[in-house]
Image (cartoon, rainbow, N blue to C red):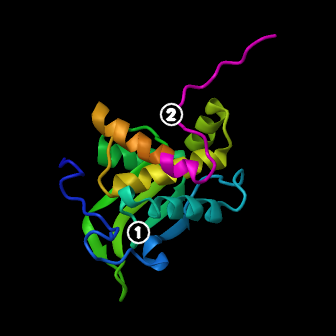
Amino acid sequence: MNDPCDSRRSSEGSEQDGSEPPSPAAQTIELDVVHEAGDWSSVPDIDNIIRRAAQAAATEPEAELAGASAALALSSDEHVATLNAAYRGKPSPTNVLSFPVASGLPVGSGAQRFIGDIVLAAETVAAEAVAMRIPTSHHLQHLVVHGLLHLVGFDHETDEEATRMEALETRILATLDIADPYAPIEADSEE
């Protein structure tokens, strides 16, 4: 896989180069949310929660998601396990799968580029949130951001890549008032 830094370009204008900063409309992302399978009822107003996470990611210049579009499927462990086996050779569910498009494809008459698909597994997402003792909605928003970053070339295969991606996720999630998902979980103390 190529280093994401090699093929990335800045979407922010600067006073130094004389270009205009992007308009507020250019700092958005279009996300098509599909309710495919799984019980997501524990997350009220789920579409809004997902869109808020995507918009937070789109306003982060380093993520380079502004002006993009993607599809996100809310699915089940069973379906995600099937996809994980078919595409990654791992016949088990995982919390999120990302399927990036090789290069952003233009969508419609606007300047948006389609960057790929994200699939989330309901049972795994809920179980992980319980294990981490955080609201399911916060974990879901983290995984939306994580999946979107994968679609634009971020990865965590090496320590250096992981450090960069985790720092970016943490910065984006802080704008949503979500604690650092990579901070150690404190053990319960007995008094």
Graded by Cα atoms within 10 Å as few (under 14), some (14 to 19) or many (20 or more), the crowding at tag 1 reads many
How far across and how far down the image is residue 101, in percent?
28, 63
- Magenta residues: mostly which secondary structure? loop
Residue 11 location, quadrant: bottom left
Q: Earlier in the sequence, mark 2 or mark 1?
A: 1
Question: Dot 1: what SS?
Answer: loop
Q: Which residue is drawn at 34% across and 66% down?
A: 115
Residue 166 appearing in the image: yes
Residue 4 falls left or right of residue 176 = left
Please provide the residue range marked out in magenta: 171-191
Residue under pointer 1: 66
Q: Which amino acid does label 2 sit on?
A: Tyr
Q: Where is residue 51 in the image (x, y as percent from the top left)?
A: 57, 65
Amino acid type indicated by mark 1: Ala
Image position of 96 with respect to 160: above or below: below
Residue 27 is situated, as x and y percent measured from the top left of the image, at 45, 71
> What residue did someone put label 2 on?
182
As displayed, is residue 67 above or below residue 133? below
Instruction: Give the farthest residue toward the front.
Output: 16
Disc 2 to disc 1, C-alpha distance: 25 Å
In magenta stretch: residue 176: yes
